Amino acid sequence: MILSGLLVVQVTAQESPQNRAASMRAQLVETQARQAELQMRLQQLEEDLKPENIEHSLAGVGSTHPEELREARRRQFEIAKKGVQSQLEILATSRARLEAAIASADAQSYQSAGNGPNITQAPTNSATSVTQGLHRTRKHRPGRRRSPRRPQA
């Protein structure tokens, strides 16, 4: 699923910025839905891992070694939990990439529509009004003098 999402992102690079952003938003919604499902599954696994719930799940099973059955069930739940956690990590990474790609596509769409300055064509050496306000001059402080440098021998 994630690999197909990455392929779709690459294919959509050839579309217009608006279409690309729309398709990525759809992918983001799917990713969020999948994350919600996995979160619910993770909560269920954590509940199932409680010793009393493991004991309850094996109540109808008779064995001469019930502690081995409980341990085997606990391991099954731990393995499933680790799998869900790794899927959630992958989805979180995919979600972050999609959000960044959507922001980029929105910026490109905004620029191509003529609503904003084209950053690639802006001069690089000119200071904007924002950066000009950040530069401040230092005030002279009378009374602070440095001793003259002495030549080293």
Image (spheres, grey):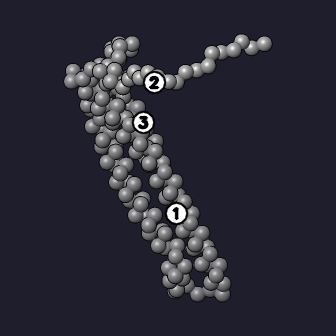
**Of 73 and 85, the residue lying toward us:** 85
The residue under label 1 is 81
User: Which numbered circle lies on residue 7?
Assistant: 3
Would you say 68 lies left or right of 108 here?
Answer: right
The type of residue carrying mark 2 is Arg
Neighbour class for label 2 at 10 Å: few (<14), some, many (≥20)? Answer: few
Image location (x, y in percent) of residue 103: 33, 35
- Would you say the residues marked 2 and 1 are in contact, meaning their CB atoms lie under 8 Å apart? no
Q: Can residue 58 be seen in this view?
A: no
Neighbour class for label 3 at 10 Å: few (<14), some, many (≥20)? Answer: few
Marks 2/1: CA–CA distance:
65 Å
If the image is split into quadrants, where does the C terminus sit?
Answer: top right
The type of residue carrying mark 1 is Lys
Closer to us: mark 2 or mark 3? 2
Closer to us: mark 1 or mark 3? 1
Would you say 46 lies left or right of 68 here?
Answer: left
The single residue placed furthest to the right in the displayed view is 153
Residue at 71% in and 12% down: 151
Q: Can residue 125 be seen in this view?
A: yes
If you read the primary sequence from the N terminus, does the residue marked by circle 2 or circle 3 appear first?
A: 3
The type of residue carrying mark 3 is Leu
